[in-house]
Amino acid sequence: MNGAAKGAVIGGVFLLMVGGAGYGVYTMLGSEMGSGGGSGNGSAAVETGPPTPKEVERTAKDFLAAWAAGDERAAADLTDNAAASRQAVIGFRTRAHVSKAVITPGTPAEATVPFKVEAEVTYEGQTKPLSYESKLTVVRGASSGKALVDWQPSVLHPQLQKDETLRAGAPAAPPVTLVDRGGKELDPEKYPSLRPVLDQLRKTYGEKAGGTPGAELWIEPAVADAPKRTLLTLAPGKPGKVETRLDAAVQAAAERAVAQHPESSVVAVQPSTGDILAVANNRKDGFNAAMQGARAPGSTMKIVTGEMLLDKGLVAADKVAPCKPTATWYGRTFRNLGGFSLDGATFATSFAKSCNTAFIGHIDEVDDDGALPREAREVFGIGLDNWKTGVPSRDGTVPESSGPAAAAAYIGQGEVQMNPLNIASITATAKTGVFRQPVIVPAALDGRTLATAERRMKPAVRQQLVSMMRLTATGGTAAKVMAGVGGDKGAKTGSAEVDGAGSPDSWFTGYSDDVAAAAMVEGGGHGADAAGPLVAQVLRAG
């Protein structure tokens, strides 16, 4: 080592003492820090105001030194949550089995200090390197006035969330190899959206797949039933094999699609079977929003509302359905996007142009607050609350409501909650007239019973609904996006207002031959703007 970096082994943990980068050489841990003096102000007066740059530098330096040396008491005394940080630092050595750590600070940005951890994890004779970057923020203690590290789990590791811990050892479930419908391996390094899906399939089917566990470092979730997230493989086990209904080519397209927008999700389903062909997310929190999310779906819900109105004989695809500038129900006025209206338009045209008032205008004729939830449940399988896809999923809700909320539900607002899996399934049902519960692994794998809908769509209703979706894809709000999609195609756009959001969520769903897909981009704006290109890209691959 040169003069700018000196090292010492303290308590079995290696601490890098770095000169430069805004810091002097680290103080060696011992009696000076054991007292937990923290900011070292040396004054009885309680300081106020933001920490000074010098305090930020000294507090971060001392905390990182204490952590790297394994002195949990000194580290804890330098944070604003001594109990939580002390347990985290203890666990870093005892539960995560970190045997060596080199912590290199970066240049502070006001009160935030980035740093890099280069560590070694050792478990039962197996040692592997672990490297990652994180950051900490220094704040002023409210009662003590000391400069303290604002303790967050992400300080210890950037992927840690509230009440989660790092653990190393032999996992309860063996590793699994995930393969698609054709036997091609679905490596999560190549298909990163499948990582949480793989973790869940491993937890559920790992022992049945015939594998044997190895040794790993993982994030132990706060919720008991949630899958753990593997960070590092120390010793590979013998993987079992789980066959899925995914399609590698469609999955690859879905991964590329969501990469275009943050907070986006997409799902593809095969209408003739219910097989899930792809599921992809691009989210900071790692949540599988594509299958477990719950957001208002906007005008994509008009597929269900339109089917209900057709089924009741209140409208017909080729008959005039008034598309007025406004529609009022129980004192609430609903408008079309931009305030447009269509004179003498058919119901098919109103569907294709996404006219809100053409749908809400019929609510008094329906005169049944339970009609839409019942249609969603009995025909589309939405709201059954018994889907068993093979991994955790949410099958959507269309609750019975009254007053303005009932009218809002007609256009996918109010209390209606969906995710891209639900909307892709709705589109698949519209295409075939039959609800087939989506599955990511076949039911035969574990003998689970799949959800079924009470009745099929009437053939005449299905024919009209499909013609309306075709018109949307060729001459309506989805025409530009779907122009490059071939085959027998249909679509529906949607945007959903979310309280407090500056821009609506973007929704889009469509089908081409035997592939149906749906996408959602949080805050993405109108359906064709953000979510539409994602669906089109997936459909072209399918």
Image: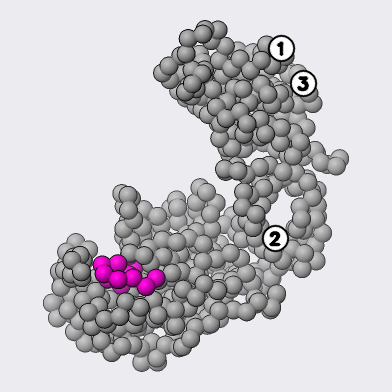
Query: To which residue does mark 3 refer?
Result: 10
Q: In percent of the image, x 71 and y 32: which residue is there?
A: 90
400 part of magenta stretch: yes
**Number of marks in picture:** 3
Q: Which residue type does callout 3 highlight?
A: Ile
According to the image, label 2 marks what residue?
Answer: 203
Mark nearest the camera among 1 and 3 is 1
Where is residue 410 drawn, in percent x and y?
30, 72
> Which of the two residues, 181 or 400, is positioned nearer the viewer here?
400
Residue farthest to the left, as pictured: 343
| In this picture, residue 399 sits left or right of residue 125 | left
Q: Which one is earlier in the sequence, the residue at label 2 or at label 1?
A: 1
Q: Residue furthest top?
A: 43
Q: Viewed as shown, does residue 251 lie left or right of 408?
A: right
Quadrant in which the N terminus appears: top right
Circle nearer the viewer, 2 or 1: 1
Q: Whole-Å distance between the Cαs marked 2 and 3? A: 38 Å
Image x and y of residue 136, in percent:
54, 29
Q: Amino acid at mark 2?
A: Lys
Residue 511: x and y in percent read: 43, 75
Q: Which residue is mark 1?
A: 31
Residue range (magenta): 399-413
- Circle 1 packing at 10 Å, graded few (<14), some (14-19), many (20+), is few
Q: Quadrant of residue 82?
A: top right
Dot 2 or dot 3, earlier in sequence: 3
Q: In the rendered view, would you say 81 is above or below 126?
A: above
